[in-house]
Amino acid sequence: MYIQLVSVHGLVRGENIEMGRDADTGGQVRYVLEMARTLAAQPEVDGVDLFTRRIKDKRYSSDYGETIEELAPGCRLVRLPCGGGRYMRKERLWPHLDEFVDEMLVFTRKDGRTPTVVHGHYADAAYVANEVATALGVPFVYTGHSLGKPKLEYLLREGWTHEKANDELAIDRRIAVEQESLDAADLVVTSTRHERDVQYADYRRDETLKVEVIPPGTDLDRFFPYYEYDIAGGEIDERFKQARMRMHHELGRFLYSPEKPLILALCRPDRRKNIGALIDAYGESKELQAIANLAIFAGIREDIESMPENEQRVLTDMLLAMDRYNLYGKMAIPKNHGSEYDVPELYRLVAAGGGVFANTAYIELFGLTAIEATAVGLPFVATQEGGPQDIVENCRSGATVDVTDRAELTDALVQSLTDRKLWEQRSSDGVNLVRKHYAWETHCRHYLKAIEEVLQDGREPAQSPGRRGPSVGRRLAEVEHLLITDIDNTLLGDDEALAQLLELLHENRDRIGFGVATGRSPELVEEVLAEYGVEEIDVIISSVGTEVSYGRRFASDRGWASHLRSRWRPDRVREALDPLGFVSLQEGVGSQSEFKVSYDLDEGVAAEEAIRLVRESLDSVRLGYSLVFSHGTYIDVLPLRASKGKAVHYVANKWGVPIDRVLTAGDSGNDIDMLKGATAGIVVSNHDDQVAAWRRNKSDRVYIADRPSAGGIIDGLSHYGVLHAKNYAEV
């Protein structure tokens, strides 16, 4: 079993994770790394690759620019280019995800292994994983981690407008992708029952969708019990001991009475974490101040003024509250901590002193920090909204409260700090039970069982609800040759020869892929395919190479569209050409598209002079473009990156079909760029004057057929040795 995991955003590396450096580098990063390593160690797993974004930015470690990082035997971290090298927050990555899809498909093809499943984590990676899984014809697994609809509801309550949420967070795009992911997924993995039953409640779900609650684990080697320091002969890594002293010193800098128990909070500086509620509860309670100190580790910071506005506001509010309640000497707010060694030692220091961990977030989807605290034997008080309820039920290691009720929160903290018998019971229960319910080994055994059930389900992944098309990647990876032909006057024109060609292609379908490249729109291509009974087709290049899709379901290649969208300005094309008196904008279905502006040349106008003037007008608006003139009357203006030939090369490269095994057939001027070069070109005998002029300087790889239309294509296939002799003889 070969598993591909995808987690696009944040700062991802195998060691020294910069947890809390920004909002995108949080628990999800730790989750996917630990999951990948543990999966790779399972006997039925041959390999695991975790795909993330490659970052080459001087502000960040060069580690993030390495393409391959070995995480463990059989487990790699693979970084792919996506939107350049500069680090971007996740909301800015949406326009670049199709590039990630293409890069991942190319990597997979070159690696030579088809994944058993592709698993996307969070909405951005789910988009990528769905596209890749669909292309390869394998199951798609989705884990949301957090969802857009609940977040939007929270933001609106906080005074945001829907427009602001879209401008800053692309919230509608995120929600739409989350719904698409649920529609397409073969398996959804959630961490808690709350996530399954409440968080997803506002999304549409097919009743047959398999949803598994599989709590993540924690690294029990790092989060060992606090009392191991008191056991003689125990071997503890020196780096943990060094971190212990470092954190002890760091806390001591803030506190007048460091011997008191600690109330510890550890979270990102995010308003949803509701840090203010904890400070208010502590600041208003003389009893809490008398029996304990408060320590809040709110992310990693150097200069508050350089941080994002949301984080600035949270940190500033913390400092103001500290001053308002005069908590100097009682409250610690260190600026930095390391996730690898410092965080486990913080939990152990607090546990050794009889303290408590606090999580006062409005909602906690899972509660990873509560699990970590539980593992070392540190009881917790946490929000009753979300995952902590499951943790209390499974491990009996803490209490959940309504964090908006200050008295309830205060009482729970006081009880945990003063009732020693209760503290010890929660501590020991937590250490014992966390190993049963929240170990990565347990998580991965449950996960692999769910994957096996999906694989045995018998339903083709490409036919799952929400899937957009067939598994073209697997199909094209298996063929020996790929035939791409123009439609009008090439594929069509001789019905008898067309029937013979389609029969030959059917008989050789295991060897020959088939596609069309045409100026027609997808709608008009569909009409032709239906009219002539063409059912077995792999690739459709339409609208003069500006659209690429696959199969009879016309599954769009979004990567090609993203590639063309760069620097394309159709409004400037209209601005340049509409004033010309000798061209008129084409009308009718499919005449215009996102990447094609089409005109008719008026009758009686000298074509050569007209095209010269068209080019001059386009050049005047400083726009990169491709100009296609065909049949003496049709003018198509396309993005500079678009053409039939470029689309053919893109498809061949994306799916690993050697370009010298791609055959192209055409008859007119707009076919020339796909006929020339390294492809095996076929020119049918009924070609136009533009092709006649070009053929005089033709490449040796172009075959000039003696027959027109489909008959000429058959002759070309035979010429290049593509057809089995017995097939061709029968024709």
Image (tube, rainbow, N blue to C red):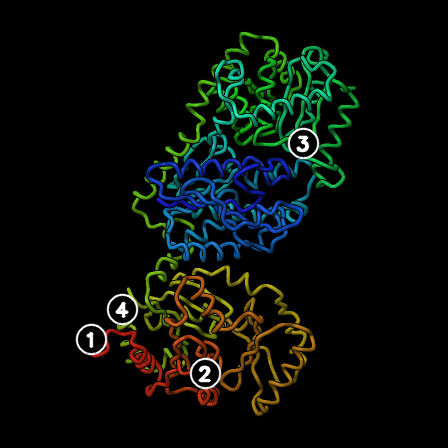
Q: Looking at the rendered structure, which numbered label has been put on residue 668?
A: 2
639 lies above or below 133: below
Measure the alpha-carbon separation of dots 4 and 3.
64 Å
Mark before the other along the chain sequence, 4 or 3: 3
Q: Which residue is depicted at the point 59% across and 27% down?
A: 343
| Image mark for residue 726 | 1
Foreground mark, 3 or 1?
3
Q: Secondary structure at mark 2?
A: loop
Type of residue at label 1? Lys
- Closer mark to the observer between disc 2 and disc 1: 1
Whole-percent x and y of residue 536?
Answer: 32, 66
The circle on residue 508 is 4
| Mark 4 neighbour class, 10 Å CA radius: few under 14, some 14 to 19, many 20 or more | some
Give, as a three-letter code, the residue at label 2. Ser
In the visual, does 106 lie left or right of 716?
right
Asked if the residues shown at circle 3 and circle 2 are in contact, with their CB atoms under 8 angstroms apart, the answer is: no
Q: What residue type is disc 4 on? A: Asn
Q: In the rendered structure, are the residues bearing label 4 and label 3 in contact, judged by CB atoms less than 8 Å apart?
A: no
Visible in this render: residue 251?
A: yes
Q: Secondary structure at mark 4?
A: loop
Upstream in sequence: badge 2 or badge 4: 4
